[in-house]
Image: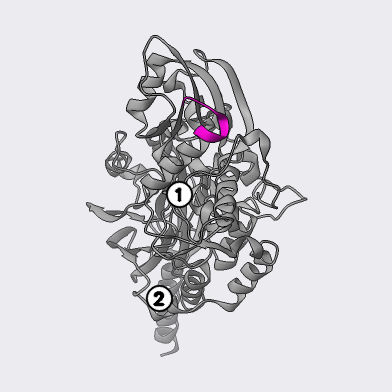
């Protein structure tokens, strides 16, 4: 009897030991997951420093309340990712060069964020210093990813940027590759990106995905990219066709501010609006070595009761920073009517024209980012929402044929002349983004070029304050009251 019991014990012990050490290939390092494992991957793209609540913007206190609740209740199921352009775009974030946004992303529990084109707006080192181990500034606990961002002519990724990370959830090993959109150098002020280049991402993604699966034994590979995904390069389609040994399980897109999801076979793709309008949610279910189910959806403010109230800890951090600049949020004038981005772009063109004495002035549509609704209180901070990119004004003498090209490509301009003759020369005023774009051919063909010590934002502030001395409401229909910029200079404590 004792012999039968001993044989039975040995058999059962061997069975249990075998079950504990089995995996894809029966080794302890890579266990087989016989039960389904669900991963909830939350995503914000193009936050643009929208930490505060606003029109269509949930604010990070409310977003953080929801995400932190998920992390507490489901720590082994929850991943939080950012899709680039996270820190630049509001006075609140820009004033501190994104330090407060970066800190709050850590507080919320972000695992990684992709590098976006607007991370270059102040010079790349202004953002990467939060990730490169610098001792004199705040250091992020999440990672900044950009596998295809190199110093020009090299394959060297700038300090503070990683090509990928590996994280663990519920025993799964998850690789996250980050890239920036192919060709997005053209959307960045030329001097800020002169030392860098963005390589075609697909072969880089394929190489890293294959390495992560074969050498690092990861179970899931995600692509986090500041790329539309469906533009001329069609990144989403390309990565959906990668072979199984370099398979991408989900793609998180950014840049165009769209709110969309798509399933490409079993691979979900998602983009989640901008400025905290939505939270993306990708669900992956993993079982027996593969993703067996996947879905993607965008959650608006009505999706969960936890998005209706702010998180006290996050709000306290924002209050700490706000103490320094709260005077810039004080109302100056109410908007006399609804004022569109087009109206404000044309207003800025007129301001540049008058301030510089040019013959014609240009403002690009992308340089004007917001509008005002009727009755809204216009403050210096809200004006920054409209003109957030710290562009400076350039004045130069330009051949008429290039001026005509600018008129064709930039619908927002103001003129002091009746018409433009292709054979004449005209003094133009514009922002440095337009002037320095290689496609406009202005740098090599202009004379008397002056990069003025005049930011567009300061120009708008001067006009607003002059307007407040005379009128009871803000309107782009009012006569412009400012004179030549040399006669004034706004000294308020602005970024």
Quadrant position of the N terminus in the picture: bottom left
Q: Secondary structure at mark 1?
A: loop
Marker disc for residue 478: 1
Depth check, front residue: 482 or 63: 482
Marker disc for residue 13: none
Q: Please tell me in which quadrant of the rendered image residue 139 appears.
A: bottom right
Q: Please tell me in which quadrant of the rendered image residue 368 appears.
A: top left
Q: Is residue 474 rendered to the left or right of residue 373? A: right
Q: Residue at x 36, y 14 (%)?
A: 421
Depth check, front residue: 396 or 47: 396
Q: Pick whichever of labels 2 and 1 is earlier in the sequence.
A: 2
- Name the residue furthest front: 470
Marker disc for residue 11: 2
Q: Secondary structure at mark 2?
A: helix
Tell whether position 83 is magenta: no
The magenta stretch spans which residues?
A: 353-359
Image location of residue 149, percent across then percent down: 52, 35
Image location of residue 450, percent across then percent down: 61, 23
Does residue 273 show up?
yes
Depth check, front residue: 81 or 442: 442
Does residue 255 show up?
no
Relative to residue 280, is residue 75 depicted above or below? below
């Amino acid at each position: 009897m004792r012999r039968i019991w001993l044989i039975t014990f040995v058999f059962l012990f061997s069975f249990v030991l075998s079950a504990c050490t089995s995996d894809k290939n029966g080794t302890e390092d890579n266990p087989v997951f016989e039960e389904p494992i669900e991963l909830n991957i939350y995503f914000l793209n193009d936050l643009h420093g929208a930490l505060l609540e606003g029109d269509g913007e949930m604010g990070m206190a409310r977003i953080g309340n929801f995400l932190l609740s998920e992390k507490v209740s489901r720590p082994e199921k929850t991943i939080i990712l950012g899709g680039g352009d996270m820190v630049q775009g509001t006075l609140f974030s820009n004033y501190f060069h994104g330090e407060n946004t970066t800190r709050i992303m850590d507080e919320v529990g972000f695992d990684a964020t992709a590098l976006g084109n607007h991370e270059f707006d102040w010079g790349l080192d202004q953002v990467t210093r939060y990730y490169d181990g610098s001792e004199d500034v705040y250091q992020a606990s999440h990672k900044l990813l950009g596998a295809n961002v190199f110093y020009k002519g090299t394959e060297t990724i700038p300090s503070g940027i990683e090509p990928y990370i590996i994280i663990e959830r519920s025993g799964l090993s998850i690789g996250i590759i980050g890239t920036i959109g192919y060709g997005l150098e053209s959307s960045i002020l030329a001097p800020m990106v002169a030392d860098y280049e963005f390589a075609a991402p697909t072969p880089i993604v394929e190489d890293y995905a294959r390495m992560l699966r074969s050498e690092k034994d990861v179970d899931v590979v995600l692509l986090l990219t500041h790329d539309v995904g469906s533009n001329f390069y069609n990144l989403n389609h390309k990565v959906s066709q990668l072979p199984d040994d370099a398979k991408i399980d989900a793609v998180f897109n950014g840049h165009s501010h769209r709110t969309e999801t798509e399933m490409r076979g079993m691979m979900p793709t998602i983009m989640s609006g901008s400025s905290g309008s939505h939270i993306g949610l990708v669900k992956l279910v993993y079982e027996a070595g593969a993703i067996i189910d996947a879905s993607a959806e965008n959650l608006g403010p009505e999706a969960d009761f936890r998005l209706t109230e702010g998180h006290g800890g996050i709000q306290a951090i924002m209050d700490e920073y706000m103490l320094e600049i709260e005077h810039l949020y004080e109302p100056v004038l109410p908007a006399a009517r609804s004022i569109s981005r087009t109206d404000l772009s044309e207003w800025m063109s007129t301001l540049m024209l008058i301030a510089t004495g040019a013959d014609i002035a240009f403002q690009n549509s992308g340089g004007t980012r917001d509008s005002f609704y009727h009755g809204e209180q216009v403050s210096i901070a809200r004006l920054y929402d409209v003109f957030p990119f710290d562009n400076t004004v350039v004045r130069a003498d330009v051949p008429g044929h290039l001026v005509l090209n600018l008129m064709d490509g930039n619908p927002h301009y103001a003129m002091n002349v009746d018409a433009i003759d292709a054979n004449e020369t005209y003094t133009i005023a514009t922002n440095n983004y337009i002037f320095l774009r290689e496609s406009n051919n202005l740098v090599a063909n202009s004379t008397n070029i002056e990069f003025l010590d005049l930011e567009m934002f300061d120009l708008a502030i001067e006009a607003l304050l002059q307007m407040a001395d005379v009128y009871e409401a803000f309107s782009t229909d009012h006569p412009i009251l400012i004179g030549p910029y040399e006669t004034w200079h706004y000294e308020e404590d602005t970024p």
